[in-house]
Image (cartoon, helix red, strand yellow):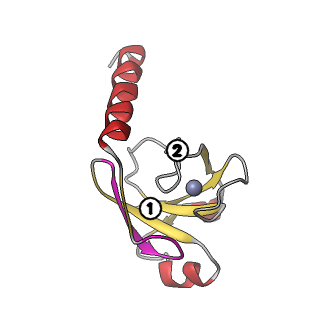
Amino acid sequence: MPVYEYEHLFDECELCEFRFGVVQGLNEEALQYCPSCGLEVRRVVSQVSVMTTRGFNAGKAADKGFTTWKRSGEGEWEKVAGPGVDAIVASEADRQAVQEEQRSKKAVDLD
Ligand SMILES: [Zn+2]
């Protein structure tokens, strides 16, 4: 699975690094919010931003202060490497908000 690089829209995050990586499937939608702090993020589209997990060295990236996250469940993230907390578990309210958003998106997408 590729590792996508994201950056915060505003450099205000005190909880995590400005840029971070997320292991995601090709068909997964881009994240809109940082799984760590909840601030808005955008996917950085560049050639180096899409690395396969095989070729991507999360440990090496961590040396440069780059955190890599992997989704481990609904609203749950585990850290692959890098600074920051080891795991993130969204609150029930957060999960509901995400589900709500996905529902409204589906209606628009004529899914
Ligand atoms: Zn953040």
Identify the residue under disc 1.
2
Q: Quadrant of the N terminus?
A: bottom left
Q: Quadrant of residue 5?
A: bottom right
User: Does mark 2's beta carbon lie closer than 8 Å to ligand 1?
Assistant: no
Q: Residues within 10 Å of mark 1 (few under 14, many from 20)?
A: some
The magenta span reads: 75-85
Q: Is residue 72 left or right of residue 46?
A: left
- Quarter of the image with the C terminus is top left
The label shown at residue 102 is none
Residue at the spot 38% in from the left edge and 63% down from the top edge: 70
The outermost residue toward the left is: 73
Query: In terms of secondary structure, where does tag 2 sit?
Result: loop
Residue 92 is covered by the magenta coloring:
no
Q: Amino acid at mark 2?
A: Tyr
Which mark is in front, 1 or 2? Answer: 2
Residue 64 seen: yes
Tell me if mark 2 has few (under 14), some (14-19) or many (20+) residues whose alpha carbon lies within 10 angstroms of its own.
some
Task: Give coordinates of residue 103: x percent, y percent.
Answer: 33, 23
